[in-house]
Image: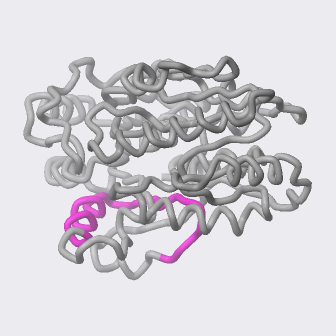
Amino acid sequence: MKIFGIFRGFPGLGRVVAGAGILNMLKSRGHEVKAYSYLQGNAVLAEYGLDKIIDKKPDKRHIMIIGLNPISVESGILIDKILDENPDLVILDGEPLLVSTLAMVFPRTKILSLLNPTDIENQSLPMSSLKFYRNHYLSAGCAFVHGLSGGSYAKIGKNYSCEIFSIRTILRPNILNYSISASGTSVVGILGGGSENASPEFLNSTVAMGRKIISLASYLPHDNFFIYCNDMKICSILCSNLPDNIKVIGKYVSPEKIYANAKVVLCRAGRNTVSELLFLKIPAMLFSTAGDFRSTEQDKNIDDVCLLSGGLMKKCHIDDSVEYIANQLYSIANELNVNYKFTPGNEKILKFIENM
Protein backbone atom coordinates (compact mmCIF):
# COMPACT_ATOMS: atom_id res chain seq x y z
CA MET A 1 0.00 0.00 0.00
CA LYS A 2 1.00 3.61 -0.55
CA ILE A 3 0.26 5.61 2.62
CA PHE A 4 0.71 9.33 3.28
CA GLY A 5 0.66 11.00 6.70
CA ILE A 6 0.05 14.69 7.54
CA PHE A 7 0.63 15.72 11.14
CA ARG A 8 0.32 19.07 12.93
CA GLY A 9 3.75 20.28 14.01
CA PHE A 10 2.89 22.70 16.84
CA PRO A 11 2.72 23.61 19.67
CA GLY A 12 3.72 20.20 21.03
CA LEU A 13 4.77 17.00 19.31
CA GLY A 14 1.80 14.84 20.35
CA ARG A 15 0.18 15.02 16.92
CA VAL A 16 3.41 14.00 15.20
CA VAL A 17 4.94 11.25 17.32
CA ALA A 18 1.96 8.87 17.15
CA GLY A 19 1.30 9.31 13.43
CA ALA A 20 4.96 9.18 12.45
CA GLY A 21 5.38 6.10 14.61
CA ILE A 22 2.52 4.34 12.79
CA LEU A 23 4.07 5.25 9.42
CA ASN A 24 7.41 3.92 10.59
CA MET A 25 5.84 0.59 11.59
CA LEU A 26 4.00 0.37 8.27
CA LYS A 27 7.25 1.11 6.46
CA SER A 28 8.97 -1.75 8.32
CA ARG A 29 6.19 -4.05 7.05
CA GLY A 30 6.94 -3.20 3.43
CA HIS A 31 4.46 -0.39 2.73
CA GLU A 32 5.43 2.75 0.83
CA VAL A 33 5.05 5.74 3.14
CA LYS A 34 5.58 9.50 2.95
CA ALA A 35 4.91 12.20 5.53
CA TYR A 36 4.41 15.93 5.99
CA SER A 37 4.82 18.11 9.07
CA TYR A 38 6.37 21.48 9.93
CA LEU A 39 8.19 23.46 12.61
CA GLN A 40 9.46 21.07 15.34
CA GLY A 41 7.45 18.20 13.81
CA ASN A 42 10.10 17.85 11.11
CA ALA A 43 12.60 16.62 13.73
CA VAL A 44 10.40 13.57 14.39
CA LEU A 45 10.07 12.78 10.66
CA ALA A 46 13.84 13.03 10.34
CA GLU A 47 14.35 10.71 13.32
CA TYR A 48 12.39 7.98 11.55
CA GLY A 49 13.95 8.72 8.15
CA LEU A 50 10.52 9.21 6.54
CA ASP A 51 10.36 10.51 2.97
CA LYS A 52 8.47 13.79 2.64
CA ILE A 53 5.37 14.32 0.51
CA ILE A 54 6.67 17.83 -0.32
CA ASP A 55 9.71 19.75 0.92
CA LYS A 56 8.15 23.23 0.89
CA LYS A 57 7.78 24.68 4.37
CA PRO A 58 4.57 26.56 5.17
CA ASP A 59 4.63 30.31 5.68
CA LYS A 60 4.00 31.01 9.37
CA ARG A 61 0.97 33.11 8.40
CA HIS A 62 -0.71 29.88 7.29
CA ILE A 63 -0.10 27.93 10.51
CA MET A 64 -3.21 28.56 12.56
CA ILE A 65 -4.47 27.35 15.95
CA ILE A 66 -6.99 25.05 14.23
CA GLY A 67 -4.47 23.65 11.78
CA LEU A 68 -2.81 24.40 8.46
CA ASN A 69 -4.60 26.89 6.19
CA PRO A 70 -6.04 24.64 3.42
CA ILE A 71 -6.10 27.39 0.77
CA SER A 72 -2.51 28.54 1.20
CA VAL A 73 0.05 28.01 -1.55
CA GLU A 74 1.80 25.32 0.48
CA SER A 75 -1.40 23.37 1.17
CA GLY A 76 -2.35 23.63 -2.49
CA ILE A 77 0.97 22.05 -3.47
CA LEU A 78 0.45 19.37 -0.82
CA ILE A 79 -3.07 18.50 -2.00
CA ASP A 80 -2.00 18.52 -5.68
CA LYS A 81 0.77 16.06 -4.80
CA ILE A 82 -1.74 13.76 -3.11
CA LEU A 83 -4.06 13.90 -6.12
CA ASP A 84 -1.16 13.24 -8.48
CA GLU A 85 0.31 10.27 -6.56
CA ASN A 86 -3.11 8.89 -5.48
CA PRO A 87 -2.10 7.04 -2.28
CA ASP A 88 -4.24 4.19 -0.98
CA LEU A 89 -4.64 5.99 2.34
CA VAL A 90 -4.01 9.45 3.81
CA ILE A 91 -3.70 9.68 7.62
CA LEU A 92 -4.20 13.15 9.15
CA ASP A 93 -3.78 14.28 12.73
CA GLY A 94 -4.59 17.79 13.90
CA GLU A 95 -5.48 19.52 10.64
CA PRO A 96 -9.30 19.82 10.66
CA LEU A 97 -9.65 22.20 7.70
CA LEU A 98 -7.24 20.15 5.65
CA VAL A 99 -9.25 16.98 6.39
CA SER A 100 -12.49 18.49 5.10
CA THR A 101 -10.81 20.19 2.12
CA LEU A 102 -9.12 16.97 1.09
CA ALA A 103 -12.41 15.10 1.52
CA MET A 104 -13.96 17.39 -1.08
CA VAL A 105 -11.37 16.60 -3.78
CA PHE A 106 -10.21 13.09 -2.81
CA PRO A 107 -12.19 9.94 -1.94
CA ARG A 108 -13.13 10.31 1.74
CA THR A 109 -13.04 6.53 2.06
CA LYS A 110 -9.25 6.83 1.64
CA ILE A 111 -8.86 9.33 4.49
CA LEU A 112 -8.27 8.34 8.13
CA SER A 113 -8.40 10.93 10.91
CA LEU A 114 -6.40 10.45 14.13
CA LEU A 115 -8.03 12.20 17.07
CA ASN A 116 -7.63 13.13 20.72
CA PRO A 117 -10.77 12.32 22.70
CA THR A 118 -11.27 16.06 23.26
CA ASP A 119 -11.22 16.75 19.51
CA ILE A 120 -14.82 15.57 19.27
CA GLU A 121 -16.06 15.45 22.88
CA ASN A 122 -15.08 18.39 25.07
CA GLN A 123 -17.46 19.95 27.60
CA SER A 124 -15.19 22.97 28.03
CA LEU A 125 -15.84 24.10 24.44
CA PRO A 126 -18.93 25.97 23.25
CA MET A 127 -21.23 23.71 21.25
CA SER A 128 -20.57 25.81 18.14
CA SER A 129 -16.81 25.10 18.40
CA LEU A 130 -17.40 21.42 19.09
CA LYS A 131 -19.65 21.10 16.03
CA PHE A 132 -17.05 22.90 13.95
CA TYR A 133 -14.34 20.41 14.93
CA ARG A 134 -16.62 17.40 14.48
CA ASN A 135 -17.78 18.56 11.07
CA HIS A 136 -14.22 18.92 9.77
CA TYR A 137 -12.42 16.07 11.55
CA LEU A 138 -15.22 13.60 10.76
CA SER A 139 -15.22 14.44 7.05
CA ALA A 140 -12.83 11.50 6.83
CA GLY A 141 -14.24 8.09 6.02
CA CYS A 142 -13.06 6.73 9.36
CA ALA A 143 -11.43 8.02 12.53
CA PHE A 144 -9.40 6.53 15.37
CA VAL A 145 -9.79 8.24 18.75
CA HIS A 146 -6.80 7.24 20.86
CA GLY A 147 -6.20 8.19 24.46
CA LEU A 148 -5.89 7.08 28.06
CA SER A 149 -9.44 5.87 28.55
CA GLY A 150 -11.69 4.19 26.03
CA GLY A 151 -15.07 5.60 25.12
CA SER A 152 -17.88 4.96 22.70
CA TYR A 153 -18.24 7.43 19.83
CA ALA A 154 -20.46 5.35 17.56
CA LYS A 155 -23.44 7.70 17.90
CA ILE A 156 -21.33 10.75 17.04
CA GLY A 157 -19.82 8.93 14.08
CA LYS A 158 -23.24 7.91 12.78
CA ASN A 159 -24.36 11.54 12.77
CA TYR A 160 -21.45 12.41 10.49
CA SER A 161 -21.35 9.19 8.44
CA CYS A 162 -17.89 8.47 9.81
CA GLU A 163 -16.87 5.16 11.36
CA ILE A 164 -15.13 5.90 14.67
CA PHE A 165 -12.92 3.47 16.57
CA SER A 166 -11.76 4.02 20.15
CA ILE A 167 -8.35 2.67 21.20
CA ARG A 168 -5.63 3.30 23.75
CA THR A 169 -2.91 5.80 22.88
CA ILE A 170 -0.75 5.00 19.87
CA LEU A 171 2.88 4.89 21.06
CA ARG A 172 6.13 5.42 19.21
CA PRO A 173 7.76 2.14 18.11
CA ASN A 174 10.99 3.08 19.89
CA ILE A 175 8.95 3.14 23.13
CA LEU A 176 7.36 -0.25 22.46
CA ASN A 177 10.80 -1.82 22.03
CA TYR A 178 12.48 -0.01 24.90
CA SER A 179 13.53 -1.37 28.28
CA ILE A 180 14.35 1.20 30.96
CA SER A 181 16.93 0.88 33.70
CA ALA A 182 15.52 -0.43 36.96
CA SER A 183 17.91 1.83 38.89
CA GLY A 184 17.49 5.31 37.41
CA THR A 185 19.27 8.06 39.31
CA SER A 186 18.08 11.32 37.70
CA VAL A 187 15.01 13.53 38.05
CA VAL A 188 13.81 14.40 34.54
CA GLY A 189 11.61 17.37 33.60
CA ILE A 190 9.81 17.30 30.25
CA LEU A 191 8.36 20.63 29.14
CA GLY A 192 6.67 19.59 25.90
CA GLY A 193 7.21 20.10 22.20
CA GLY A 194 8.28 23.77 22.13
CA SER A 195 7.00 27.32 21.88
CA GLU A 196 6.92 28.02 18.12
CA ASN A 197 3.52 29.51 17.24
CA ALA A 198 2.28 28.68 20.74
CA SER A 199 0.10 31.08 22.72
CA PRO A 200 1.69 33.42 25.31
CA GLU A 201 -0.19 31.51 28.01
CA PHE A 202 1.38 28.22 26.88
CA LEU A 203 4.86 29.78 26.83
CA ASN A 204 4.43 31.40 30.25
CA SER A 205 3.12 28.21 31.87
CA THR A 206 6.03 26.26 30.34
CA VAL A 207 8.58 28.70 31.72
CA ALA A 208 6.86 28.68 35.14
CA MET A 209 7.02 24.89 35.24
CA GLY A 210 10.70 24.94 34.25
CA ARG A 211 11.50 27.42 37.01
CA LYS A 212 9.63 25.28 39.54
CA ILE A 213 11.80 22.29 38.58
CA ILE A 214 14.94 24.46 38.89
CA SER A 215 13.81 25.49 42.40
CA LEU A 216 13.33 21.82 43.21
CA ALA A 217 16.89 21.10 42.06
CA SER A 218 18.17 23.80 44.43
CA TYR A 219 16.14 22.22 47.24
CA LEU A 220 17.54 18.73 46.43
CA PRO A 221 21.25 19.44 45.74
CA HIS A 222 22.28 15.77 45.93
CA ASP A 223 20.01 14.72 43.03
CA ASN A 224 20.84 15.15 39.34
CA PHE A 225 18.21 16.99 37.27
CA PHE A 226 17.64 17.28 33.52
CA ILE A 227 15.07 19.48 31.78
CA TYR A 228 14.13 18.71 28.16
CA CYS A 229 12.25 21.56 26.50
CA ASN A 230 12.87 20.99 22.75
CA ASP A 231 13.05 24.74 22.27
CA MET A 232 16.08 27.04 22.34
CA LYS A 233 13.95 30.06 23.29
CA ILE A 234 12.68 28.38 26.45
CA CYS A 235 16.15 26.99 27.10
CA SER A 236 17.73 30.45 26.97
CA ILE A 237 15.11 31.84 29.38
CA LEU A 238 15.75 29.07 31.92
CA CYS A 239 19.53 28.82 31.67
CA SER A 240 20.53 31.81 33.80
CA ASN A 241 21.92 31.14 37.31
CA LEU A 242 21.29 27.40 37.27
CA PRO A 243 22.35 25.26 40.24
CA ASP A 244 25.22 22.87 39.52
CA ASN A 245 23.02 19.76 39.62
CA ILE A 246 20.73 20.61 36.68
CA LYS A 247 21.12 20.74 32.91
CA VAL A 248 18.60 22.22 30.42
CA ILE A 249 18.48 20.78 26.89
CA GLY A 250 16.84 22.92 24.21
CA LYS A 251 16.97 20.63 21.17
CA TYR A 252 14.90 17.60 20.18
CA VAL A 253 16.05 14.46 21.99
CA SER A 254 14.82 10.93 21.31
CA PRO A 255 12.69 9.35 24.05
CA GLU A 256 15.25 6.61 24.71
CA LYS A 257 17.76 9.22 25.85
CA ILE A 258 15.19 11.17 27.86
CA TYR A 259 14.00 8.14 29.83
CA ALA A 260 17.34 6.29 29.97
CA ASN A 261 18.27 7.16 33.54
CA ALA A 262 15.04 8.60 34.94
CA LYS A 263 14.02 7.61 38.44
CA VAL A 264 11.07 10.02 38.30
CA VAL A 265 9.66 12.43 35.69
CA LEU A 266 8.02 15.84 36.13
CA CYS A 267 5.89 16.79 33.15
CA ARG A 268 2.60 18.07 31.80
CA ALA A 269 -0.24 15.59 31.47
CA GLY A 270 -0.28 15.43 27.69
CA ARG A 271 -1.74 12.21 26.33
CA ASN A 272 1.41 10.90 24.64
CA THR A 273 3.90 11.56 27.42
CA VAL A 274 1.78 10.09 30.23
CA SER A 275 0.90 7.08 28.07
CA GLU A 276 4.61 6.44 27.50
CA LEU A 277 5.28 6.74 31.22
CA LEU A 278 2.44 4.33 31.99
CA PHE A 279 3.71 1.81 29.47
CA LEU A 280 7.30 2.06 30.78
CA LYS A 281 6.14 2.21 34.44
CA ILE A 282 8.18 5.32 35.24
CA PRO A 283 7.01 7.29 38.32
CA ALA A 284 5.84 10.82 37.53
CA MET A 285 4.57 14.06 39.01
CA LEU A 286 2.02 15.56 36.62
CA PHE A 287 1.34 19.27 36.06
CA SER A 288 -1.69 20.46 34.14
CA THR A 289 -1.22 23.42 31.78
CA ALA A 290 -2.66 26.31 33.73
CA GLY A 291 -4.07 29.32 31.89
CA ASP A 292 -4.30 27.55 28.55
CA PHE A 293 -7.03 25.86 26.52
CA ARG A 294 -5.37 22.47 27.15
CA SER A 295 -5.91 22.67 30.92
CA THR A 296 -9.29 20.90 30.91
CA GLU A 297 -7.99 18.07 28.73
CA GLN A 298 -4.86 17.64 30.82
CA ASP A 299 -6.71 17.73 34.14
CA LYS A 300 -8.85 14.86 32.87
CA ASN A 301 -5.69 13.04 31.74
CA ILE A 302 -4.26 13.42 35.23
CA ASP A 303 -7.38 11.95 36.83
CA ASP A 304 -7.36 9.03 34.38
CA VAL A 305 -3.67 8.25 34.69
CA CYS A 306 -3.56 8.49 38.49
CA LEU A 307 -6.30 5.84 38.62
CA LEU A 308 -4.53 3.63 36.07
CA SER A 309 -1.06 3.84 37.64
CA GLY A 310 -1.89 2.42 41.06
CA GLY A 311 -0.04 5.19 42.91
CA LEU A 312 2.93 5.48 40.53
CA MET A 313 1.84 8.94 39.38
CA LYS A 314 0.59 11.94 41.34
CA LYS A 315 -0.82 15.37 40.60
CA CYS A 316 0.90 18.60 41.56
CA HIS A 317 0.18 22.28 41.01
CA ILE A 318 2.57 24.98 39.90
CA ASP A 319 1.86 26.82 43.18
CA ASP A 320 2.73 23.85 45.40
CA SER A 321 5.82 24.35 47.58
CA VAL A 322 9.06 22.68 46.53
CA GLU A 323 9.07 20.90 49.90
CA TYR A 324 5.68 19.33 49.16
CA ILE A 325 6.68 18.33 45.61
CA ALA A 326 9.96 16.87 46.87
CA ASN A 327 8.15 14.72 49.45
CA GLN A 328 5.67 13.49 46.84
CA LEU A 329 8.51 12.85 44.40
CA TYR A 330 10.35 10.61 46.85
CA SER A 331 7.18 8.75 47.78
CA ILE A 332 6.50 7.70 44.18
CA ALA A 333 10.18 7.08 43.36
CA ASN A 334 10.06 4.30 45.95
CA GLU A 335 6.59 3.06 44.92
CA LEU A 336 6.51 -0.71 44.44
CA ASN A 337 2.82 -1.06 43.56
CA VAL A 338 3.04 -1.26 39.76
CA ASN A 339 0.56 -4.06 39.24
CA TYR A 340 -1.10 -2.75 36.07
CA LYS A 341 -0.69 -3.15 32.32
CA PHE A 342 -1.09 -0.43 29.72
CA THR A 343 -1.71 -1.90 26.26
CA PRO A 344 -1.29 0.74 23.51
CA GLY A 345 -3.54 0.93 20.43
CA ASN A 346 -0.83 0.33 17.82
CA GLU A 347 -1.71 -3.20 16.80
CA LYS A 348 -5.43 -2.42 16.43
CA ILE A 349 -4.87 0.45 14.02
CA LEU A 350 -2.16 -1.43 12.11
CA LYS A 351 -4.46 -4.40 11.68
CA PHE A 352 -7.27 -2.13 10.47
CA ILE A 353 -5.04 -0.42 7.91
CA GLU A 354 -3.57 -3.64 6.56
CA ASN A 355 -7.07 -5.16 6.22
CA MET A 356 -8.38 -2.25 4.16
Q: Left or right of 269: which side holds 307?
A: right
Residue visible at 27% across and 73% down in the picture: 160
Question: Where's residue 14, x and y in %?
Answer: 46, 43
Q: Position of residue 8 (x, y in %)?
A: 33, 40
Q: Which quadrant would residue 337 be assigned to in this image? A: bottom right
Image location of residue 335, percent across then percent down: 87, 53
Q: Nearer the viewer, residue 119 or 220?
A: 220
Q: In the rendered structure, which segment of residues is drawn in magenta?
A: 130-152
> Is residue 47 visible in this depiction of the protein?
no
Q: Residue at x 82, y 29 (%)?
A: 185
| Residue 48 point in image, percent of width and height | 53, 23
From the viewer's side, name the closer residue of 77 and 353: 77
User: Along the line of sight, which residue is nearer the eye, 97 or 267?
Assistant: 267
At horizontal 45% and vertical 63% (from top left) the residue drawn is 297
Residue in view at x 41 percent, y 45 percent: 205
Question: How many badges with numbers are in the image?
Answer: 0
Q: Is residue 148 magenta?
A: yes
Colour mapping: one colour
Vertical position of residue 159 compared to residue 103: above or below = below
Q: Is residue 346 above or below residue 299?
A: above
In this view, 276 is above or below 126 = above
| Residue 279 against residue 222 in the figure, above or below | below
> In the displayed structure, does residue 136 sit left or right of residue 194?
left
Residue 299 within the segment the image draws in magenta: no
* Left-right relation of 262 to 316: right
